[in-house]
Image (cartoon, rainbow, N blue to C red):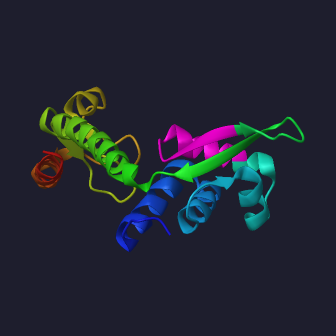
Amino acid sequence: MTGISDKERQTLLSMVEDVAGPDVREVAIILLTHKGELTDEVISDELGIKLNQVRKALYLLADLDLASFRRERDKTTGWFVFFWKVHPEKIRDLVKEKQENVLDKISVRLKYEQGNMFFTCETEGCKRVTFQNAMELDFICMVCESRLESFDNSKIISVLEKKVDQLNEILH
């Protein structure tokens, strides 16, 4: 077992699955539970999946900078053998990068909410529209044809501001 905590291990596996899928997660589990390096053939045998699927998963882990390999030429066959190892310590960088992406998206949404006035008919299934769209619709809902009324988005803005503050505190 590699020298990371259970929480870091679970975070790593969760992030890998979110970013690359469950097959890559299974490969990461095998790499985490073995000390040292493993060949793609050993991983394929342990998981019972095709070698090309294992290699694809390993390359995805390498793209995330969570795994690396070294290669040696097999003296009897002349083929290259790839020895893979995992880098769980890189999870912090991956988590930070993901948090920065979330912060960027929330900041864009916050600016949108702050920069627009919204209208809604408050009928379930109908969506709110910006002032510009409401004007074009003559303040009549295009779905249910009810009158569009001003929508107070101050609670949405407040929630987004708190989330931006939380993420900024974590990241800085």
Q: Residue at x 46, y 51 (%)?
A: 87
Q: Which residue is more in the foreground, 73 or 161?
A: 73
Q: Tell me residue 167's x, y (percent).
A: 18, 50
Outermost residue, front side: 75
Locate residue 26, reporting x and y percent.
62, 62
Does 6 lie within the magenta span? no
For the question of whether residue 145 can be seen, the reply is no
Residue drawn at x 25%, y 34% is 134
Q: Residue at x 29, y 46 (%)?
A: 96
Foreground pick, 150 / 97: 97
Instruction: Please say whether residue 60 is one of the residues in the magenta stretch.
Output: yes
Q: Is residue 14 left or right of residue 161?
A: right
Query: Start and end of the magenta stretch?
Result: 55-71
Position of the C terminus, as image quadrant, is top left
29 left or right of 99?
A: right
Judge whether 83 appears above or below 1 on screen.
above
Q: Is residue 104 above or below residue 32?
A: above
The residue at 12%/37% (across/down) is 114
> What is the total number of numbered labels drawn onto the structure image?
0
Using the image as rendered, state which of residue 98 and residue 2 is in the foreground.
2
Which is more toward the observer, 19 or 93? 93
Above/below status of 149 relative to 34: above
Q: Going by the image, does 75 lie left or right of 147?
A: right
Q: Position of residue 8 (x, y in %)?
A: 37, 65
Answer with the quarter of the image where residue 159 lies. Answer: bottom left
Residue 95 on image: x %, y %: 34, 50
Q: Residue 10: in sight, yes or no?
A: yes
| Image position of 147 with respect to 159: above or below | above
